[in-house]
Amino acid sequence: MRLTPRNTQFFDLFRTAAEHVLDATHVMAALVAAEPPARAPLVARMVELEHAGDTCVHEVMKALNTSFITPFDREDIALLAARLDDVLDELEEAAQLTQLYRIGSLPDGVHQQVALLERAAELTVPAMQGLASLDGLTDFWVGVNGLENEADEVYRTALARLFDTETDAIALLKVKEVLDRLEEAADAFEHLANVVQSVAAKES
């Protein structure tokens, strides 16, 4: 049986990172609903959250380098931090592109994607807290995998509709890039869920 250290630094960092991800999905929801002139401060907030996520990753790696005993495999700890950061990276990229490309109103598919990402993030915060006891994690990876499947369908439908209705090739490519980044964010949530499932299997 693995010896679990009394301090909770890794679990605290994972929870903080997950809260940044949840905040980022809320910011993204506000951004895609906002008129273009109102998006700049939301993009700035997204950048702050992405930087905060980077800080969490650095803190996790620092803790790994200074801890003799870890709650579970070092490789899995590093992977969890990286996967949480991947979600933030994709959200920040989507936000930046929306502003950089001066995209006007975004199609329904984008709003649907973001709503699914919010739901995945809402599952992630308690799951990161649950890592300490490994209780109740099945609902997390089952839920996130289900949401990722929904996100795939939304992405394909939105892409098909975009190609059917958008006559401006440049505008089409701009929106497609945002759709792509949000799809990558959904994939990143699935990758995170897979790491959690692997940790639970190893430690149970």
Image: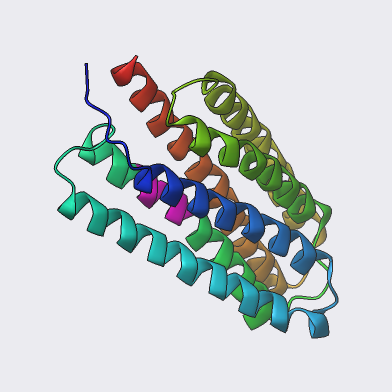
Residue 62 placement, left or right of 100? left
Residue 2 placement, left or right of 163? left
Residue 59, quarter of picture: bottom left
| Residue at the left extreme of this rendering | 68
Residue 170 visible in the shown view: no
Pick the front one: 13 or 50: 13
Residue under the image location 29 percent in, 37 percent down: 76
Pick the front one: 150 or 43: 43
Tell me residue 201's x, y (percent): 35, 17
Residue under the image location 44 percent in, 54 percent down: 86
Residue 67 placement, left or right of 144? left
Residue under the image location 36 percent in, 51 percent down: 82
Q: Which residues are magenta?
A: 80-86
Pick the front one: 166 or 41: 41
Tell me residue 150's x, y (percent): 68, 33
Tell me residue 103's x, y (percent): 74, 76
Residue 92, quarter of picture: bottom right
Q: In the picture shown, does residue 111 fall above or below 92? A: above
| Residue at the front extreme of this rendering | 6
Pick the front one: 101 or 37: 37
Tell me the quarter of the image containing the C terminus. top left
Residue 6 highlighted magenta (yes or no): no
Q: In the picture shown, does residue 171 fall above or below 41? A: above
Residue under the image location 50 percent in, 67 percent down: 50
Chief SS of the magenta region:
helix
Tell me the quarter of the image containing the N terminus. top left
Residue 138 placement, left or right of 164? left
Residue 135 visible in the shown view: yes
